[in-house]
Amino acid sequence: MKIICATNIPYALEAFGPLGNLTILPPSAITPERLHDAELLIIRSTLRVDESLLSGSRVRFVGTTTIGTDHLDLAYLERAGIAWCAAPGSNANSVAEYVTAALLCLSQRHGWTLAGKTIGIVGVGNVGSKVLQKAQALALRVLQNDPPRQAAEKNPVFLPLPQVLSEADIVSLHVPLTRTGSYPTWHLAGKSFFERLKPGMVFLNTARGAAMDSDAFLAARSTGKVAYSVLDTWEGEPEFRTDVLAKADIATPHIAGHSFDGKVMGTVMVYQAACRFLGIAPTWTPEGLLPPPVVPEIRVDPAGQSEEAALWQIVRQVYDIEADDRRLRAGAIADSKTRSRQFEQLRTNYAIRREFRFTRVVLPPGHSQLEQKIRNLGFMI
């Protein structure tokens, strides 16, 4: 059995190699000709999978090691009888840690306090639920909006979007990208969305670029409705608008979910799904292969600083979100084609970023409240 796997999937050889004749290719090299006699295709979100790619091939299983599926033509796959899977939740904690770093960075950069502010989480699925936990650890008041969950669960914790937007000091998007159905999210953050916001709020989009209308965002920035913004996803990416970039306080190349551990979990989930499809027992795990943490221990003396300043001191050592921002801006002066290529290279060549749980934080005695916050953010104490 021939298997084609895209590059930038951790442990692809170890996981999928034993299942058949494995070939690992960059997404640009995965063509109809290369897929002609392949039966399994394993990818990330940089490859569009549709009839033009698979027609005439022997592919009968497609696995994407990402949480999103908007790069898959699901209607075609189901019509053609091709099984498929994604990895929902695999990088949820990574995105939540990115949001944590972004909020602490902004609060310290601009001199305001997170504790007591209200965050509206739009989309409370795998990712949004993790963001909720981190927000509570930061002593934020949380408002939740998730129409599909509200319809299914009838839980009063899920509030109407207009209410969330009018009350929140911070709004964070965590929705899939859909254009049809009962709850489309394409340009969800559009003109009416931004008009409902409190003036001077913080807006984050780590979901999908087209969940935000770029022109509506720029208008909201010009009127002061949005005072601070964090953008990780972009309409039309890998192309991105430099005028939108200029109005983002923190801008990154769609890497919020790119922790090494999130990527590995994506590999594990797709490997297990492929084994189920093939009717064989999964035997591979990444245990014993994971690299040591980049930052195994941090010692902090919080004397003389606020708890949030101490938290930022800790978080930035594990994940320097400002470095990701600088790298994206460094390529923004190039022409459109070069910008797109550099955007993709930043994602493909992304450095290993381990999650908070692999770092132990050591504090002097007498800081039990701060210890609890650190633990709730996911660090070891």
Image (cartoon, rainbow, N blue to C red):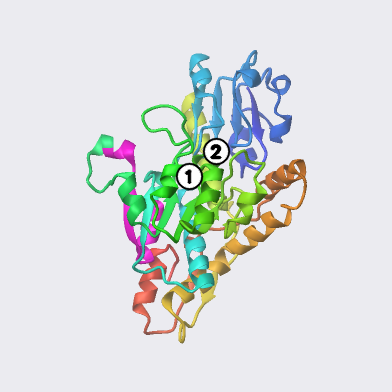
The residue that label 2 is drawn on is 65
* Residue type, numbered disc 2: Thr
Q: Measured along the vertical axis of the image, is residue 107 above or below residue 133? A: below
The residue that label 1 is drawn on is 90
Residue 189 seen in this snapshot: no
Residue 133 within the magenta-colored segment of the rendering: yes
Choose between 242 and 51: the one closer to the eye.
Answer: 242
Residue 27 seen in this snapshot: yes
Q: Gap between marks 1 and 2, in whole Å?
A: 8 Å
Q: First in sequence: mark 1 or mark 2?
A: 2
* Residue type, numbered disc 1: Ser
Mark 2, secondary structure of its residue: loop
Which quarter of the figure has residue 169?
bottom left
- From the top left corner, tell me how far across and down residue 278 is, in percent: 51, 24
Local crowd size for mark 1, using a 10 Å CA cut-off: few (<14), some (14–19), many (≥20): many
Q: On the rendered image, what quadrant is the N terminus found in?
A: top right
Question: Residue at point 69% right, 17% down?
Answer: 36
- From the top left corner, tell me how far across and down residue 373 is, in percent: 38, 69
Local crowd size for mark 2, using a 10 Å CA cut-off: few (<14), some (14–19), many (≥20): many
Question: Residue at point 63% right, 41% down?
Answer: 237
Mark 1, secondary structure of its residue: loop
Looking at the rendering, the stretch of residues picked out in magenta corresponds to 130-150
Q: Measured along the vertical axis of the image, is residue 165 above or below residue 268? A: below
Q: Which mark is residue 26?
A: none
Q: On the rendered image, what quadrant is the C terminus found in?
A: bottom left
Question: Residue at point 42% right, 71% down?
Answer: 113
Which quarter of the figure has residue 182?
top left
Q: Are marks 1 and 2 in contact (CB under 8 Å)?
A: yes
Q: Measured along the vertical axis of the image, is residue 272 above or below residue 226? A: above
Q: How many marks?
A: 2
